[in-house]
Image (spheres, rainbow, N blue to C red):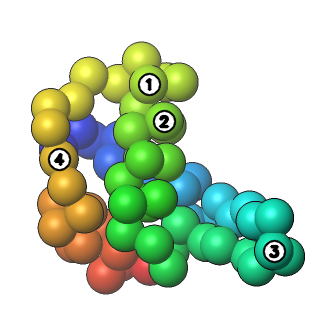
Amino acid sequence: MPTETQQAVNWALQYEYTDEFGFVHKASEENHLLVDKVREYFNENNVEYSTFSYDDLVPYLETN
């Protein structure tokens, strides 16, 4: 994983949105959303990365 992974996870954990039914969804509660947001962070910050899954991010969650 890139050295920026912890920053990406921290950034992604702040993300939440409200769906059309008024339910709030947080990246910390939805594994696929967390992975998507970490990828978004990497892409926006030109961080090179290879394929990864939620399981690869778990060690970074444990430091929060």
Q: Residue at x 41, y 32 (%)?
A: 42
- The picture places residue 54, in percent across and down from the top left corner, at 25, 63
- The three-letter amino acid code for the residue at tag 3 is Phe
State whether residue 3 is above or below residue 13. Answer: above
The residue mark sitting in front, 4 or 3, is 3
Q: Which residue is mark 1?
A: 43
Mark 4 element type: loop
- The picture places residue 49, in percent across and down from the top left corner, at 22, 30
Q: Which residue is mark 3?
A: 21
Q: Earlier in the sequence, mark 4 or mark 1?
A: 1
User: In the rendered image, is residue 47 in sight?
Assistant: yes
- The three-letter amino acid code for the residue at tag 2 is Glu
For the residues labelled 2 and 1, say whether their Cβ atoms are less than 8 Å apart.
yes
Q: Tag 4: Cα neighbours inside 10 Å, few (<14), some, or many (≥20)? A: few
- The three-letter amino acid code for the residue at tag 4 is Phe
Q: Which residue is mark 2?
A: 40
Quarter of the rendering occupied by the N terminus: top left
Q: How many numbered discs sit on the rendered protein? A: 4
Q: Residue at x 50, y 79 (%)?
A: 29
Q: Tag 3: Cα neighbours inside 10 Å, few (<14), some, or many (≥20)? A: few
- The picture places residue 7, in percent across and down from the top left corner, at 46, 50
Mark 2 → mark 1, Cα distance in angstroms? 5 Å
Q: Which residue is mark 4?
A: 52
